[in-house]
Image (tube, coloured by chain):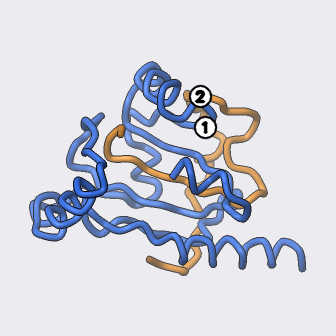
Chain colours: A orange, B blue
Amino acid sequence: MSKTRRTLPEGLLERPVEGRRLRGRTLGEEPTLVVFLRHFG
Amino acid sequence: MRERTEHGGFPPVLIVHMGSPEEGERFFAERWPEARAVSDEDRALYAAFSLRRGTAGQLLGPRVWMAALKAALLGHGVGAPVGDPLMLSGWFLVRGAVVLWAHPHEHAGAERRWDDLLQAHREALGEGASA
């Protein structure tokens, strides 16, 4: 765990993505938990 | 996690997976219809968040077996791998382009740090209110 803040690479958030139930900018000003999966289930 | 998100005080969730958009849709339509999810088949997002492939110890070591046993006792199975089965998972609290809190999983059976996450979320909301 780390509380060291870092900034994501420039342009990452503008990169088009595919998925489901996405609307507008995927990551906005509201704190969002981004969960990276290893597998489904 | 789905149950946790239904309680107040939990941040909105965005799931990133290595499957195709169609695989993601099939899985989440059945298991978590409300989930927002991004397909990252080329693992560019995983790389941007500095997630890496695990070592043999991180993927198959005793901590992983203990976690799997604990999950099995609770009635949880291990899902089928999608994408690169060697990649490690992780959780990140993000606002815009800023990573407020990071929990890259140190091994494949890493415990979920709910309390740390909720504390970081409360702090983030406090910052937003005072800005």
For the residue marked with disc 2, what is the amino acid?
Arg
For the residue marked with disc 1, what is the amino acid?
Arg
- The quarter of the picture where residue B81 lies is top left
Query: Residue B46, percent across and down?
Result: 41, 50
Distance between the alpha carbons at the discs numbered 2 and 1: 6 Å
Q: Nearer the viewer, residue B3 or A28?
A: B3
Query: Pointer 2: what residue?
Result: A20
Q: Nearer the viewer, residue B30 or B46?
A: B30
Query: Residue B96, percent across and down?
Result: 70, 57
The disc label shown at residue B36, or none: 1
Chain of residue at mark 2: A
Q: Residue furthest right?
A: B130
Q: Nearer the viewer, residue B22 or B112?
A: B112
- The quarter of the picture where residue B50 lies is bottom left
Residue at figure coordinates x 20%, y 57% from the top left: B68
Chain of residue at mark 1: B
Pick the quarter of the image with the C terminus of chain B: bottom right
